Amino acid sequence: MPVLRILIAGEGHRIFFLACDFISQGHQVTIVTPDAAGGKTLSRRLKALVIVGDPSNPDVLREAGAEDMSVVLAISPRDEDNLVICQSALRLFGVARTVALVNDPEMVDVFQRLGVTRAFTLTHLLATIIERRVETQSVLNLVPLDEGGVNLTEIVLEAPSPVAGKTLAEVRLPVGGLVACIIREGRPVIPGGDTRLEAGDRLTVLTQPDNHAAVIRVLTGEGRRA
């Protein structure tokens, strides 16, 4: 899977979950938010470049490196700002793929006619994410604990996983990553170092935001560079 450079522009709690999802897949994330307090929190909890500023301002997008982005995702609560962000990304910085959250469903077609690559209502966006999770079945869910300081993730080990057949002692997880439980054939197993991982195992994994992506890559092989 190619590594993408993704710019997320906007504010609110959605940024954290979207950024965490992209980072877990090995993508490079830059966040632009007008919320100074929220930006400080995101910078502390995510392995991402966070810039505080108005993302509808082209100078701020330039500072964020918009010209180098693979995708720009606009999720401001204001439709007009999201449209400006996407049009600036396309026309001023040559970003080929722009995605906008549209709060008014009747504006979806308007956004796409004005050059936005994909425009979603929140309902459509969530449905797409859920559909993708059902299709991949590798990372089933991501639950933030301690206000986002710890992630609880359930992973299904598929046959191609690089750790299938290895003991936990042989798997070198990044510091701070922990396989807390294994569900095997419907029964829970509390693992030790000599527990051997098998294809089909459901792993309950604890991670932190700064090591989450690396732990997922070790266990599933997803998001690795070619």
Image (spheres, rainbow, N blue to C red):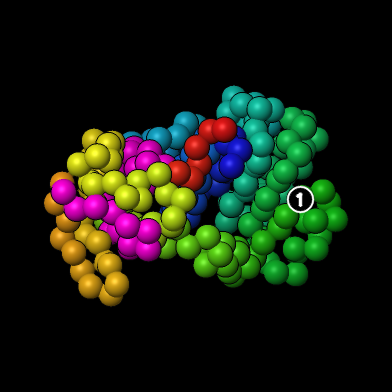
Magenta residues (range) = 194-220
What is the quadrant of residue 203 in the picture? bottom left
Give x and y (percent) for residue 131: 57, 67
Q: Quadrant of the N terminus?
A: top right
Dot 1 amino acid type: Thr
Q: Residue at x 24, y 47 (%)?
A: 167
Vertical position of residue 181 compared to residue 164: above or below: below
Instruction: Specify whether residue 61 is painted magenta.
Output: no
**Where residue 106 sits: x, y (%)?**
75, 69
Left or right of residue 139: residue 178: left
The answer to whether residue 95 is seen in the rendering is yes
Residue 112 pos. (x, y %)? 80, 56
For the point 24% across and 39% down, which residue is it? 170
Say which of 43 and 192 sits in front.
192
Tell me if residue 141 can be seen: no
Asked whether residue 214 is drawn in magenta, I would say yes
Instruction: Quickly name the residue at label 1.
Output: 117
Expressed as whole percent of the image width and height from the top left, the position of residue 101 reads 63, 57
Q: At 37% across and 41% down in the image, what residue appears?
A: 218
